[in-house]
Image (spheres, rainbow, N blue to C red):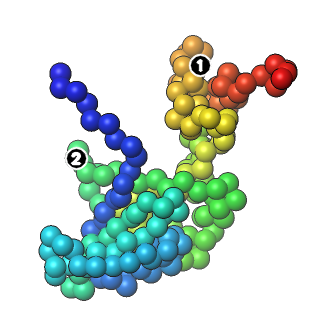
Amino acid sequence: MPAPLATQGIHHITFMGADRQTSIDFWQGVLGMPFVFEQPNLDDPAQGHLYFDPGDGRLITVFTREDWQVDRSPNPNDAGNLHHLAFNVSRAMYTQASKRLREAGFASSGEIDRGFMDSLYFRDPLGQLLELACYKFEPPVGHTHARVLAEAHRLRLQRGALNIEDQDLADALVALTPSSSAGP
């Protein structure tokens, strides 16, 4: 087997948009992602290439063309297609998301408990399913969400549970947190 590549996170994600203004209105206006810059799509100069900051300094980009029409039909849910993209939000924002989306004209799934996180799904103006997700925990200093989830998964398998639950998260956090009684 060949040696694997080593990725270091998501660099950017590019969507196929419609016209420029639809993309700006949604990504900046509805989701609050600052519009960073635009330039032509260097692979097809007839298209625009818009860049937005999703909140972590990385980029969401959108190819646009003024003659592309808005089509709210759900995107295909077949093998090889993107099912959804999830954005991390704070607990405070999560509790307001459904109401704010509704006020902006977007229906949502409402709040869904996923065991280790809470989710809310909605479709963008072009039918792409998006998720707003909020973890139920903060990782201990020096650990990542993925590390806590790996430990919670191990604990849930020991219990024979279907999915990660609050007790698995709590026990994982205890296991990964240095004991406060250890002293100096």
* Residue to which mark 2 is pinned: 80
Instruction: Tell me, for residue 114, which label it has, or none.
Output: none
Residue 47 appears in the rendering? yes
Query: Does residue 92 sit above or below 169 in this rendering?
Result: below
Image side of residue 100 versus residue 82, left or right: right
Q: Residue at x 48, y 61 (%)?
A: 57
Q: Residue 35: horizontal and vertical position, in percent? A: 44, 77
Q: Residue 12: horizontal and vertical position, in percent? A: 35, 58
Quadrant where the C terminus sits is: top right
How many residues crowd around disc 2 within 10 Å: few (fewer than 14), some, or many (20 or more)? few
Q: Quadrant of residue 46?
A: bottom left
Q: Quadrant of residue 140?
A: top right
| Three-letter code, disc 1 | Leu
Image side of residue 89 versus residue 39, left or right: right
Mark 2 lies on a secondary structure that is loop
Please name whichever residue, 156 or 152, is drawn nearer the observer in this view of the structure.
Answer: 152
| Three-letter code, disc 2 | Gly
Please name whichever residue, 128 or 73, is drawn nearer the observer in this view of the structure.
Answer: 128
Quadrant where the N terminus sits is: top left
Please name whichever residue, 19 or 5, is drawn nearer the observer in this view of the structure.
Answer: 5
Mark nearer the N terminus (2 vs 1) = 2
Q: Residue at x 31, y 65 (%)?
A: 15
Instruction: Tell me, for residue 155, which label it has, or none.
Output: 1
